[in-house]
Image: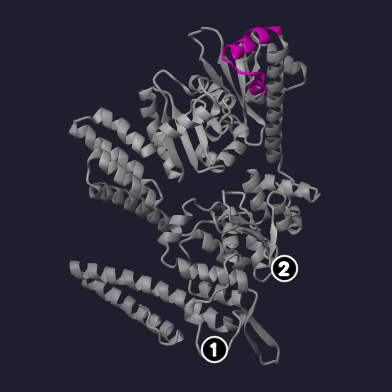
């Protein structure tokens, strides 16, 4: 872990316009800079960099954040990787925290395994190009498949020699420990002897997103029915097959440039597409598609086309897994190749432009594809058709975007000859159930712990829409960030000393005293951490949350800080001669807090009235009396807040 003082030095040194200008041509516009967004195609610049605020914001695609966020997004690095990138740019020595003995051992073991994998890749590649057996057998196979030298070298394809222990012995002679050869899966220990896992196979190194070799896939070249055609490295500290995609390192740049990713099944499918001139392609390597793999692709694009061969049975087995793609808010299309063809063989029959033309002409939306595919089986069988409708409804229901859902409902209604209203009824049932379950879980767990908040759930968008106080709470967060350190009230005590109450102190005190908590953990985290840090002399809310290690928090801060300071009509009075927003704080902040309290009271009152109706319907007089007392208390609070707001009605 990078020492916090080093992180602070990096944030202090990384000037946002300097960082961004390494990748984007910026032009001065007033106090800000303007340029074309590097994250989406645009002709008119909407990408703004604010040196004063230390943030960037694109008003076209919505991306924004601090210098570290920019490097993470543009260079596709994780948080630590982006920090190290900036440290190198500004010549800052990275000091990492001292690890516990267990952490140190785990880190060293992981690094040792990566070094062993790197050695193995170089050894296998050398075998393929320089060893007589490798040239005759391994390279002979690659030539037979029609792969050119530049493709073979690009993917560092290799060959593991025949024999039980040729590689294992060579690795040990070079000083590599037995334990790391075994934990990486390169060797298998049997009766105190190491045997080569991949002996006699062509080797396809599996690279991580940064280009380091994490694992291997090996294809057997003999007709041996007892041995698997393809063999992969086992799961280890450095390799999780559900979280990596073959070819992602070689494809990531092209995926970003083309705003699309093609997903195929095997290693040679990827190589063949690259050889045909299409580089934005990755493979799931025979594993069922996982949410982690989808999120990995989503780091580079929201558009995926899954390419299948003509095996209908295999496609049907994969359909449910593809629902994961829809759930991750990714646009997914499907391409079914002609019978008897696979991506490898098909891509070798045509050039890049011809292949792209075929794909664009024949790919179809997943939902439509799935509907037509299942419809062939259902035919006129009413039970099968009913099951088909349920299957399609579930797939459409998990699509988060309402407009896209509506388009699919219309298309599927036409294909299935089912009234749209029937489909909507079933879809709404599913959506409401999911939201209800999510809401219940949120209420049951109340607010998350500090550790849980640091991770923050992926359904923040739903929480915002489900939170009826979102507007008021976001306004409070905005006020804390922009004006929290401003003086709200000032008075002298009995000794003549001036006492100051800051905006942030007032807001946090009001929220704490009345035990007001947000159901959105993102807002609550801001309130909690503001309260914990506001008494520190060095605390600056803007930089604290803008440079927060949690990406969701710093994204929220960037969004809010990039908003213009506009007053609500509620605070504007015709007779007012106050010129600046800061000067209006004494009017704004108490009203803002009371508006929030009023909204909370209204929601509580709504719940009480509903409960009173239930009590009346069931004739429960004791419960009715209890609720009437609660209503009287809420009425008193409502009247007090209304008085504070100038006798405005709280409805």
Give the side of residue 303 with respect to residue 389, left or right: right
Mark 1 sits on what residue?
Answer: 576
Q: Residues within 10 Å of mark 2 (few under 14, many from 20)?
A: few
Q: Is residue 329 visible?
A: yes
Q: Quadrant of the C terminus?
A: bottom left
By what rule are the colours in the image chosen?
Answer: one colour
Mark 2 sits on what residue?
Answer: 538
Work out whether residue 617 or residue 402 is closer to the camera in this orientation and state it. 402
Choose the circle earlier in sequence order: 2 or 1. Answer: 2
Give the side of residue 452 with respect to residue 487, left or right: left
Residue beneath the point at 72% across and 28% down: 115
Q: Residues within 10 Å of mark 1 (few under 14, many from 20)?
A: few
Please tell me whether the stretch drawn in magenta is mainly helix, strand or loop.
helix
Classify residue 150 by image quadrant. top right
Classify residue 416 by image quadrant. top left
**Picture coordinates of residue 267, whole percent (x, y):** 55, 23
**Picture coordinates of residue 181, whole percent (x, y):** 67, 22
Span of residues in magenta:
132-153
Tell me, yes or no, whether the highlighted magenta stretch contains residue 570.
no
Decide: is 122 above or below 634. above
* Dot 1: element: loop
**Picture coordinates of residue 545, whole percent (x, y):** 63, 62
Work out whether residue 235 or residue 357 is closer to the camera in this orientation and state it. 357
Give the side of residue 514 with respect to residue 159, left or right: left
CA distance separating discs 2 and 1 = 35 Å
Decide: is 136 above or below 363. above
Q: Is residue 290 visible?
A: no
Instruction: Say which of marks 2 and 1 sits in front.
Output: 1
């Amino acid at each position: 872990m990078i020492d916090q003082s080093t992180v602070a030095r990096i944030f202090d040194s990384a000037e946002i316009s300097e960082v961004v200008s390494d990748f984007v041509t910026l032009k001065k516009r007033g106090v800000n800079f303007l340029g074309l967004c590097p994250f989406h195609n645009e002709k008119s610049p909407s990408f703004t960099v604010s040196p004063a605020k230390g943030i960037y914001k694109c008003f076209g695609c919505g991306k924004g954040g601090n210098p570290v966020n920019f490097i993470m997004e543009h260079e596709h690095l994780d948080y630590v990787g982006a920090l190290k990138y900036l440290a190198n740019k500004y010549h800052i020595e990275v000091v990492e925290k001292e690890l516990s003995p267990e952490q140190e051992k785990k880190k060293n073991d992981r690094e040792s395994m990566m070094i062993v994998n790197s050695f193995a890749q170089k050894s296998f590649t050398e075998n393929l190009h320089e060893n007589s057996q490798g040239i005759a057998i391994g390279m002979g196979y690659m030539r037979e498949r029609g792969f050119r030298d530049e493709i073979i070298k690009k993917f560092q394809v290799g060959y593991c020699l025949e024999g039980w222990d040729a590689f294992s012995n060579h690795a040990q002679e070079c000083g590599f420990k037995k334990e790391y050869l075994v934990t990486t899966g390169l060797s298998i220990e049997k009766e105190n002897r190491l045997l080569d896992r991949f002996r006699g196979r062509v080797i396809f190194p599996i690279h991580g997103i940064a280009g380091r070799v994490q694992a291997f896939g090996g294809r057997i070249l003999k007709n041996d029915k007892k041995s698997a055609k393809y063999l992969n490295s086992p799961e280890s500290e450095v390799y999780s097959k559900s979280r990596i995609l073959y070819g992602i390192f070689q494809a990531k740049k092209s995926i970003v440039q083309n705003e699309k990713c093609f997903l195929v099944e095997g290693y040679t499918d990827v190589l063949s597409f690259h050889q045909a001139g299409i580089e934005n392609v990755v493979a799931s390597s025979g594993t069922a598609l996982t949410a982690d793999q989808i999120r990995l692709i989503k780091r580079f694009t929201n558009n995926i086309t899954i390419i299948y061969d003509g095996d209908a049975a295999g496609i049907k087995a994969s359909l449910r897994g593809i629902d994961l793609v829809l759930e991750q808010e990714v646009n997914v299309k499907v391409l079914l190749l002609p019978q008897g063809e696979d991506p490898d063989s098909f891509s070798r029959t045509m050039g890049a432009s011809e292949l792209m033309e075929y794909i664009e002409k024949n790919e179809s939306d997943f939902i439509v594809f799935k509907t037509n595919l299942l419809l062939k089986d259902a035919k006129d069988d009413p039970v099968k058709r009913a099951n088909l409708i349920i299957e399609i409804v579930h797939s459409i229901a998990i699509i988060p975007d309402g407009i896209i859902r509506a388009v699919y409902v219309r298309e599927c209604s036409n294909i299935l000859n089912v009234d749209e209203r029937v489909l909507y009824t079933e879809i709404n049932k599913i959506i409401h159930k999911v939201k209800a379950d999510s809401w219940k879980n949120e209420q049951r767990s109340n607010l998350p712990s500090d550790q849980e908040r640091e991770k923050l759930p992926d359904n923040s968008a739903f929480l915002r829409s489900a939170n009826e106080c979102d507007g008021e709470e976001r306004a409070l967060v905005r006020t804390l960030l922009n004006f929290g350190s401003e003086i709200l009230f000032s008075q002298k005590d009995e000794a003549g000393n001036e006492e100051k109450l800051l905006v942030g102190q007032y807001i946090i005190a009001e929220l704490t005293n009345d035990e007001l908590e947000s159901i959105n953990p993102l807002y609550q985290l801001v309130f909690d951490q503001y309260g914990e840090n506001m008494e520190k002399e060095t605390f600056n809310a803007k930089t604290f949350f803008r440079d927060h290690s949690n990406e969701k928090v710093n994204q929220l801060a960037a969004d809010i800080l990039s908003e213009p300071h506009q007053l609500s009509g509620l605070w504007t009075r015709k007779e007012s001669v106050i010129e600046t927003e800061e000067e209006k704080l004494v009017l704004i902040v108490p009203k803002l807090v009371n508006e929030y309290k009023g909204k909370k009271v209204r929601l509580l009152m709504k719940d009480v009235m509903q409960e009173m109706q239930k009590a009346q319907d069931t004739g429960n007089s004791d419960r009715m009396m209890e609720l009437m007392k609660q209503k009287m208390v809420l009425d008193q609070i409502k009247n007090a807040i209304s008085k504070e707001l100038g006798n405005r009605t709280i409805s």
